């Protein structure tokens, strides 16, 4: 078989490990793996009339020799993008496709993608990505392309699986940084507002606060009252013998009465941490550190849980691909590895189970029982 593999959306630690494990597994049966650069953009940019230039721009041959050492670093050797071939913006459109499109865009270039898949003689495509990348994988599946999906996003919000590659390392990093910030926060007797990536799901904020024992956690799912928050944090600070307090906040969190955050995946984050910090200072006169952890949460090497998930997701995806399965998503359900219908992607959204895990009055995690719950509780 000739298998195309790509990584879309934000990079996370563990993807290179996943690529290596996939290549090693399918090489055992003599199959060839072609890396597609920059996610779906690699196929959008592939011009069948210019195979040499296109190969250089869009392809990256992956063999056992080439992947030997890639698992030692984070990120993705294939590079990544958020390009969605069903909604290509005018600035993303390659010149050789420009004359074929009607109107001002965005454009659906799926017909082109299908000719490229055909022209490259790909027998299957493995897509490693978050919701948006996998939604397009599902589209290709509906168009008849054999596709297997691997869930990857530090937000951990792909519907259907307990776990997405990158989440554990993002939480590990967040906990480390929260503890590091304690020295500066405590020495100056401040309040710290720590903003964490997580555009639609508050799981990173909730789990990081739970594991780092932050005083409060704000999540996307529950709009907060800044005055109430300020009063709680002032009280937390007063009770703390070291005279400081800390709150984590999802980048997608919002104050009561505010509009929900913009859904555009390319839009910059709202800066809610800085705005909340300024509000607290204004209300209380307290000195506030507003620190956004952002890309540091998903930079660098994977932790061992992400190495484990990356390896096992890759092995499952490789087995499905060589067995000629199509339209499947690998993942974890109730803590157990398995695969499911890729349609699951579109059948719901994965958000924090507020009733089970969050105290919406006290703005903090509330985990009463863990019996029967998966590793990360949801
Ligand atoms: O992949 C998810 C994510 O890490 C979000 O939590 C965050 O909003 C976004 O990516 C940031 O994306 P970028 O790296 O493109 O700025």
Image: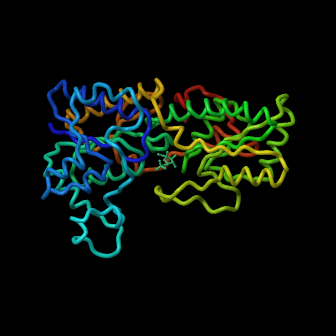
**Count of numbered badges drawn on the protein:** 0
Please indicate whether residue 262 sits to the left or right of residue 46 in the image: right
Residue at position x 61%, y 34% from top?
208
Q: In which quadrant will I find the N terminus?
A: top left
Q: In x, y percent, where is residue 218?
A: 67, 45
Q: In x, y percent, where is residue 362?
A: 76, 42
Compare residues 260 and 286 and report the one nearer the observer: 286
Q: Say how the picture is coloured.
A: rainbow
Q: In x, y percent, where is residue 351?
A: 55, 45
Residue 280, compared with residue 246, is above or below; it is: below
Residue at position x 12%, y 58% from top?
49
Residue at position x 73%, y 34% from top?
184
Residue at position x 71%, y 45% from top?
360
Report the residue that reaches farthest toward the bottom: 103
Q: In x, y percent, where is residue 94?
A: 27, 62
Residue 107, compared with residue 59, is above or below; it is: below
Please indicate whether residue 120 sits to the left or right of residue 170 in the image: left
Compare residues 29 and 16 and report the one nearer the observer: 16
């Amino acid at each position: 078989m000739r298998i195309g593999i790509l990584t879309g959306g934000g990079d996370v630690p563990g993807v290179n490990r996943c690529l290596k494990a996939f290549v090693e597994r399918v090489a055992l049966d003599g199959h060839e793996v072609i890396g597609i650069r920059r996610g779906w953009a690699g196929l959008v940019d592939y011009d069948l009339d210019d195979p040499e230039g296109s190969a250089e721009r869009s392809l990256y041959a992956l063999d056992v020799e080439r992947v030997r050492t890639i698992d030692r670093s984070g990120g993705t050797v294939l590079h990544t993008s958020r390009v969605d071939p069903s909604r290509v913006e005018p600035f993303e459109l390659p010149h050789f496709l420009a004359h074929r499109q009607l109107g001002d865009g965005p454009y659906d270039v799926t017909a082109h993608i299908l000719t490229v898949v055909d022209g490259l003689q790909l027998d299957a495509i493995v897509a490693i990505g978050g919701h948006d990348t996998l939604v397009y994988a599902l589209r290709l599946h509906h168009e008849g392309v054999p596709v297997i999906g691997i869930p990857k996003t530090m937000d951990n919000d792909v519907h259907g699986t307990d776990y997405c590659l990158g989440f554990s390392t993002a939480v590990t990093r967040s906990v480390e940084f929260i503890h590091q910030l304690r020295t500066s926060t405590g020495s100056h007797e401040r309040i710290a507002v720590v903003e964490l990536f997580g555009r639609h799901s508050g799981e990173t904020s909730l789990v990081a606060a739970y594991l780092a024992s932050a005083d409060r956690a704000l999540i996307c799912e529950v709009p907060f009252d800044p005055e109430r928050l300020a009063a709680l944090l002032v009280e937390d600070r007063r009770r703390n013998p070291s005279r400081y307090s800390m709150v984590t906040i999802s980048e997608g969190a919002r104050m009561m009465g505010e509009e929900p955050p913009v859904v555009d995946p390319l839009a910059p984050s709202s800066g809610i941490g800085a705005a909340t910090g300024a509000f607290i200072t204004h209300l209380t006169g307290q000195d506030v550190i507003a620190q956004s952890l952002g890309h540091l949460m998903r930079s660098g090497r994977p932790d061992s849980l992400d190495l484990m998930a990356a390896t096992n997701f890759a092995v499952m995806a490789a087995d499905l691909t060589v067995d000629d399965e199509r339209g499947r998503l690998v993942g974890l359900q109730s803590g157990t590895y398995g695969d499911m219908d890729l349609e699951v992607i579109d059948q719901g959204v994965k958000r924090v189970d507020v009733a089970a895990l969050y105290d919406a009055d006290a703005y903090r995690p509330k985990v009463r029982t863990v019996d029967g719950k998966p590793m990360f509780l949801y």
